Each structure stands twice: as structure tokens, then as C-alpha cells.
Amino acid sequence: MSYVNTLMEKIVQRNPNEPEFLQAAREVLESLEPVIERHPEYVDAGLFERIVEPERQIIFRVPWVDDKGEVQVNRGFRVEFSSAIGPYKGGLRLHPSVNLSIIKFLGFEQIFKNSLTGLPIGGGKGGSDFDPKGKSDAEVMRFCQSFMTELYRHIGADTDVPAGDIGVGGREIGYMFGQYKRIVNRYEGVLTGKGLTWGGSLARTEATGYGLVYFVDEMLKTRGESFAGKRVVVSGSGNVAIYAAQKVKELGGEVVAMSDSNGYFVDEKGVNLDTIRLLKEVQRKRCKDYLAMHDHASYFEGCDDIWTVPCDIALPCATQNEINEQSARTLVANGCIAVAEGANMPSTPEAVKVFLDNKVLFGPGKAANAGGVAVSALEMSQNSMRYSWTFEEVDAKLKDIMVNIHKKAYEAANDYGFSGNLVVGANIAGFLKVADAMYSHGIV
Ligand code: NDP
Ligand code: 2IT
């Protein structure tokens, strides 16, 4: 049996109830086969066995009192996966589906994504099974304060720097930052995605979506294409989806459909982003409510069928495994030329295979959505300097970083004999930097 298969068997045995983590680990390890051949010293140093085991996993109780005066208990997580190239860095997800498997898959992906940015950040992820939907601001605040009352002892500006992810935006980061500062009595850049008046970076809100579109633009260039005149479907309608859609429009594309976990809407005239921002960022309403303001649009219950809407470019920006093999086949049959992952692992392994087999340009999440964490790292730099760059300065750096990530992944794929395969390219390029650091540090 090959080294990777033997190792995968061990990982399955050790983590039997973690399907998302096993999916992410298998995808990365299988694409590292050619690296293993070139670097037997990494095998001798047990580097692969070590990289799939988090340095530290923290699970804790989060008790809080709801508006009715009743005690609620959630489970909090922080998985500090790798500090080989910098402090642990990665978001916090608040969603009822959150469990150890999901946080571990996200933390594992984050190691390689963060490496690809070229900035000094390790990999981690956290969150809770708390559902912010339908909760009052006061309930969200009490939850966030309780969550931070445990988390604070594990994090710090040079140790572990969390940020947002699903269900965590400016409001939640604000409540968590306030509680951290109160407990430790230090004003430090311990979280990113902060508000602009208290240490946040310009362009962090836009960064993941903008970065995704900059990345796709690079993919399209390799085939002499651009966004101009393209029909684009963007799933989700949260932070990543909204700013991806905005940048698509700026580059001359038309976004014709968006979704949330209840359903999707199609607007053949092009999605009105002011409406979406109002509904989602201000009113915390649903995609269904888009129709009340644009009655020519149509709404469909259930989010899976959004991939049946014909498009040239598909940008999954909602959640893991939202594109299965069938949806991928439908996209291909409808003439889709490019798919790039704004979400983390939104395509199942079978879907990815369909895209690659059919020569669809495919940008894997750890490369395509790295713009968010890249600007988080720039927020850390600005906090350290006690200085802030303009929007244009940050945006220019973001663009540069995305162009470079595409270049690194493209070149690594070529170098290892997988020309055009950015999945393999991103995994190899992301891995090599972390591996070199781990090798230098000895067996730790
Ligand atoms: P938000 O909470 O702002 O938005 C999430 C969107 O996805 C909402 O429209 C939500 O719908 C939808 N969604 C969430 N869960 C599901 C589900 N189980 N099924 C269907 N739809 C769902 O999160 P973000 O935009 O920040 O994150 C979206 C994705 O991007 C995630 O995969 C995240 O890990 C990834 N990502 C985020 C980064 C960031 O900087 N924020 C950086 C890199 C990646 P509803 O409102 O109905 O729940
Ligand atoms: O998945 C991700 O990269 C994020 N949620 C952003 C992490 C960060 O630290 O900005």
C-alpha cells in the first residue's frame, strides 16, 4: 500500500466520526504524493503524521442567559492546528451545524491557505453550535461575552488571532473584542475584522469577495477570457457573496442569482446589490424578501438547485459540500467555463473531479478565498505599526497577493507535472513553505 494510503487509514482510525476533516485531509494528502517522492526526508521526520494532528484542541462550555431569563448552554471550539509559520490564524463560525469535524477541516485547510498568502500566519479555526439567527442583539452579546470569557486565555496578538466566518461579522467581533479587552486590560490586535474606529483595516469587509474575483480574473486570463459580459451565479448572500458580486459587476459581469439556506432567487436584469446589502447587512432578512422590492425576479425554495441556473461562471460562497457531482454535471452541461470557491470546500470531491475532467477552470477555496485572511494579516501588520493604510493601499496589496497566489499554484502544478490543475498546485505550494518551517524546527 502507498505511504499516503497507509497514513490515511491511520487518520481514519484515529478520527472515525469526522467526515469533513477526513475529506479535507484526504484531498490534501493525495495531491502531495509527488512531493513525498521528491522529499523522503519529510517522511523520515514524520512530518505528514504531525501535520494532520492539531497542535492543540480546545472544547469548552459556553453558558448564557436568553431574553426570557432561561439558561442556555452551547459548546465552544478552538482548534490551534499549526503554528509553524506564524501565530494561529483563522475565523470563528457560529452555526448550529458546528462540531469538531467541521472546525478541524476548516483549521486544516487554513494552514495551507495562510501559507499561500505569503504572510506569516499559522492555521486555526474555532466557533460554536450557537445559532445567531433569530436572537436579539442582547442575546448575541451575552453569548459572545461568555464565549470570550473562556477563549481569552488561549489567544493573543502573538499567539492566536481569530476573526469572522459564517455567523460572525462586525457585530460579533465587536462584542468579543470588548470582552477580551476588559479581561486582559490590554488594547491589542487579538481579533481581525474589527471596526474601523477601533483597529480594523479598510477593505477587510470586502477582502474575501474581492480577492475571489481577482483570482478568477487571473484564471480567466490564462484562456484569454475576462468577466466582461459573463453571466455569474453566486451562492450565499453573506459577507463573501455580497462583495464577490460587487466586484463581478465592477469588472463587467452580471450576477443573475444568489441564495441563502432557505432558497435562491433569479434576477435576469442583474441582482440589485443595494437591495441585498439592505436585506442582509442592515435588516437581517431573507433572500425571499428580494421579491417584494423587485417583482420581476423569481424565488425558489431550497438552495441546491441554484446550480441549474445557466451561467458562465459559478462562485459558491455559502458552505461546505454545496455542489455535488450532479450539480457539477449540470453546470458543465450548461456551458460553465469557470468555478471558484469563495466558501471553504463547497465542492464535493466528486464535483471537483467533474470540473477537472471537463477542463473547467477550477479555483480551490484555499487559494481562491485567501483574500480575507490575507487582509486580516495586513490588519495585524497595521495594528503592530499603530498605523493604517488607505482603502486603495490595502486593495492594491490584496490584488497583488491574489495574483501571486494564482501564480504560485499555477507554477507548482506545472513543476510537478499537473499542468492547469490548481487543486494540486495550491496544495503543493501551500504545503512546501509549512513543511520547510516544520523541518527546521525539529520534532515538535
Ligand atoms: P456569512 O454568515 O456572512 O454568510 C453565509 C451565507 O451562506 C449566508 O447566505 C447563509 O445563509 C449561507 N449558508 C450558511 N450555511 C449554509 C448552509 N448550511 N446551507 C446553505 N446556505 C448556507 O458567512 P461568510 O460569507 O463569511 O462565509 C461564507 C463562506 O465563505 C464560508 O464557507 C466561510 O468559511 C467562507 N470564507 C469566509 C471568509 C470571510 O472572510 N468571511 C474567508 C474565506 C472563506 P443563511 O443566512 O440562510 O444562513
Ligand atoms: O476561512 C477563512 O479564511 C476566514 N474565515 C477568514 C479568517 C481570518 O482570519 O480572516
Image: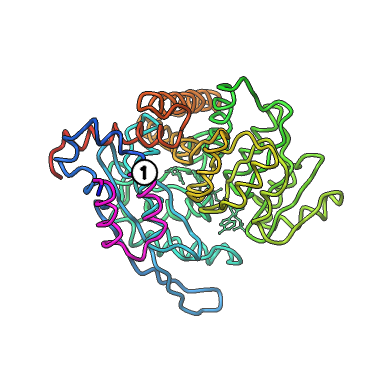
Q: Amino acid at mark 1?
A: Val
Residue furthest top as drawn? 224
Which of the 4 quarters of the picture holds residue 64? bottom left
Where is residue 147 shown, x and y percent of the image? 40, 62
Where is residue 54 shown, x and y percent of the image? 27, 52
Which of the 4 quarters of the picture holds residue 379? top left
Residue 12 counted in the magenta span: yes
State which region is magenta: 2-29
Helix, strand or loop at label 1? It is: helix
| Residue placed most toward the observer, 236 or 364 | 364
Q: Residue tagged by mark 1?
A: 28
Q: Is residue 397 left or right of 315 when viewed as pictured? A: left
Where is residue 444 shown, x and y percent of the image? 15, 45
Q: Main secondary structure of the magenta part?
A: helix
Q: How is the image coloured?
A: rainbow
Question: Relative to 150, is 200 above or below?
Answer: above
| Residue placed most toward the observer, 189 or 118 | 118
